[in-house]
C-alpha cells in the first residue's frame, strides 16, 4: 500500500521547544524533596493531557497539577500545589530538528501530502514560517483554531479533509497521537459498519 498522506505532529516531532513544561515542573518538585525522573513526570503529564479533548485558553491540553501529582502518587500540601500552579504553556526557545528538513524533502520528492496536526498556541504558524517548513505542507490543523485537541478524533478528521487516502499519522506522545488517531479509525470503521448494516436491512 502506497502512503499518499502523512499527518504530522509538530512539537517534539519536527520542532523542539526549550525549556519543556515538565522540565520546569520537575525543578519545583525537587525543591520540595521529591526525586522524580524526567521520564516519570513526562509520562504522568501525558496521561493527564490524554484525558482532555478540548483546549484551554491558549489552545493546549489543560493540565491540572493535582491530576499530575495523583499520577505520581504524591499527596501534596497546599504549598506544593501553589508552587506548581502556573502557566506552563510557553517555551521561549524553539528549533528545527536537524533531520526534519531532510525528512520533509524526501516526502516531497515522493509526492506525499503533508498535513501538520498540532496541539498548539497561535504562535505556531509564526514558528512554522520562521523555520521554513510551511512550503512543504499542504495544510496546518492547529488546536487553537479548530477548538479540539488531540486525542479528540475530530482534529484528525479535519486533517483528512486536506489529504488523500491512504494516510498515516506520526507523533511523539502515545496518549495524544497514537490514541487519537486510533479513535478516528475506530469511528470510521463503526460508521462503515453501521452503513453496511443499514443497507443490508434496507435491502431485505
Image (cartoon, grey):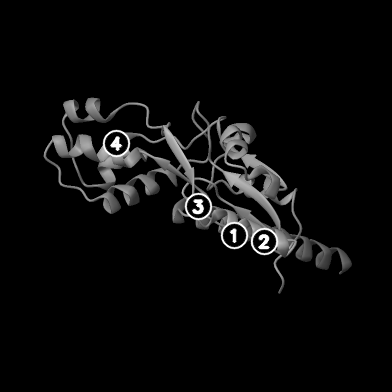
Residue at disc 1, secondary structure: helix
Percent coordinates x, y for residue 120 in the rendering:
53, 37
Asked if the residues shown at circle 1 and circle 4 are in contact, with their CB atoms under 8 angstroms apart, the answer is no
Q: Which mark is residue 107?
A: 2
- Residue 129 visible? The answer is yes
Quarter of the rendering occupied by the C terminus = bottom right
- Upstream in the sequence, badge 1 or badge 4? 4
- Upstream in the sequence, badge 3 or badge 4? 3
Percent coordinates x, y for residue 129 in the rendering:
62, 37
Side (left or right) of 88 relative to 82:
right
Label 1, on which residue? 103
Q: Which mark is residue 24?
A: 4
- Look at discs 1 and 3 and give the one toward the viewer: 1
Side (left or right) of 78 relative to 201:
left
Percent coordinates x, y for residue 121 in the rendering:
53, 32
Residue at disc 4, secondary structure: helix
- Upstream in the sequence, badge 2 or badge 3? 3
Residue at the right extreme, as displayed: 203
Identify which residue is drawn at 18% across, 26% down: 78
Label 3, on which residue? 13
Amino acid at each position: 500500500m502506497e502512503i499518499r498522506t502523512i499527518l504530522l505532529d509538530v512539537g517534539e516531532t519536527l520542532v523542539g521547544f526549550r525549556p519543556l513544561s515538565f522540565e520546569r515542573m520537575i525543578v519545583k518538585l525537587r525543591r520540595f524533596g521529591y526525586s522524580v525522573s524526567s521520564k516519570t513526570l513526562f509520562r504522568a503529564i501525558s496521561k493527564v493531557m490524554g484525558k482532555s479533548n478540548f483546549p484551554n485558553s491558549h489552545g493546549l491540553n489543560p493540565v491540572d497539577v493535582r491530576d499530575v501529582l495523583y499520577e505520581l502518587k504524591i499527596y501534596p500540601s497546599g504549598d506544593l500545589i501553589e508552587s506548581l500552579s502556573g502557566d506552563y504553556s510557553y517555551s521561549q526557545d524553539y528549533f528545527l530538528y536537524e533531520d526534519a528538513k531532510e525528512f520533509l524533502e524526501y516526502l516531497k520528492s515522493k509526492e506525499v501530502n503533508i498535513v501538520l496536526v498540532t496541539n498548539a498556541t497561535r504562535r505556531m504558524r509564526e514558528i512554522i514560517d520562521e523555520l521554513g517548513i510551511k512550503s512543504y505542507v499542504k495544510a496546518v490543523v492547529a488546536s487553537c483554531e479548530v477548538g479540539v485537541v488531540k486525542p479528540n478524533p475530530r482534529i484528525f478528521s479535519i486533517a483528512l479533509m486536506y489529504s488523500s487516502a491512504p494516510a498515516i499519522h506520526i507523533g511523539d506522545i502515545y496518549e495524544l497521537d497514537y490514541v487519537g488517531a486510533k479513535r478516528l479509525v475506530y469511528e470510521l470503521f463503526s460508521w462503515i459498519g453501521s452503513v453496511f448494516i443499514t443497507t443490508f436491512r434496507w435491502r431485505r
